[in-house]
Amino acid sequence: MKWKIAGINFDHFHMGDLLRMAHNHPDAELVGISDEDESRMFGARSNFGLTPDQVFTDYRECLETTRPDLVLLCPAAARHAEWVEKVAPFGGHVIMEKPFAASLAEADRMIAAMEESGRQLAINWPLVWCRSHAKTHEVIRSGAIGEVAEVHFYDGNRGPLWHGADKIEKEPTEEDKDASWFYKAGEGGGSLQDYLGYGTTLGTWFNGGQKPIEVMAMWDVKSNGLEVDEHSITVARYEAGLSKFETRWGTFSDPWIMQPQPKCGFVVKGTEGTISSYDYDEFITVQTPGWPNGERVEAPELFTPRSNPVEYVIDCLESGRPIEGPLSVEMSRIGQQIVDTAFESAKCGRALPLIT
């Protein structure tokens, strides 16, 4: 069958990337796109050869007319629950672009809405599709570094307005920041909300689903003159030890072009070894008693059906397999628990038990 796919809400520029994945999938058909601001759809309409009757400013008309099997959603973080609740009654499966939500309560609303519809919900974390991180998970599961004891995460970019769909570079103005939801606290903006879920969700994937006992976070919201942070550091205490998750808008360079210092990615310490896994690398470095100086291990290119979220979700739906790993609501919910606790900790300035 051809999977009919629609893209709804263009708040997040990753919509262009997701639409391209749908457009390129041999068993998918891009049947419609919708956004209240028609100008935000011009690029997609041109890039994917959509006709005027496939472009809508009313999401209901889009869904009623096209009846998609799968909906791609890219709203502002604080509106994820609202948009899942709007879309779910129309009966399509949903891929929500990261983060999961702006709060755990909203994430639970999303889960409930999709359970009522009887359809699947997947949360896309683009770092999942880095071959280095996929290889890291494979090596961890093999037992090569023993039990995971620490996850160290540092990630971000020059800022969310320095690039658009397909990572096309642009230089933002102060007016761009003023107009963007990324820089509005009430819309779920800030580097913590933007990037911490990456670290906590993939970190949970690496550590086998462990939850921390306690979380403490600090952010910088005073020196930048903005209402949201551009830098945050979160420490999570597990039964096995401490892990650290750091988010940064304002890296020296964008990691997909040239890795900044500190490098963006993960370092995982196990009871019998360590792994460094940096974003977009074609290898990881594994240190064990047999390789005390560290050994480069090739990270193979990711192939169908595990090279992007659209083909992965379609494969799960076709085979009747559950959505697993970081895209699953179960693992993403643990990541959201840590994010929520970190957010509250940064506001009150003290360590807090994990929010449940």
Image (cartoon, helix red, strand yellow):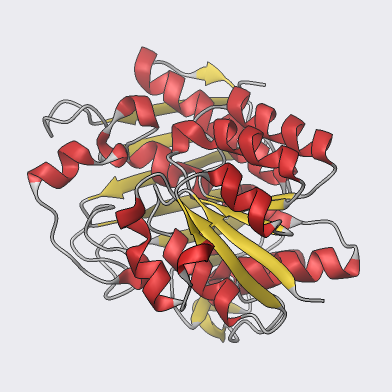
Residue 290: x percent and y percent?
63, 79
Horizontal side of residue 109 vs 185, given as left or right = right
**With respect to residue 166, does 246 lie above or below?**
above
Q: Is residue 197 visible?
A: yes
Q: Position of residue 107 (x, y in %)?
A: 63, 32
Q: Is residue 287 above or below residue 235?
A: below
Count of residue discs: 0
Percent position of residue 106, x then y = 59, 27
User: Where residue 190 sits: x, y (%)?
Assistant: 32, 37
Query: Camera-side residue: 243 or 328?
Result: 328
Q: Closer to the camera, 291 or 248? A: 248
Residue drawn at x 44%, y 78% as measured from the top left: 281
Spot the residue most to the right: 320
Q: Quadrant of the N terminus?
A: bottom right
Q: Is residue 114 above or below residue 300?
A: above
Residue at position x 77%, y 47% from top? 91
**Residue 211, image quadrant:** top right
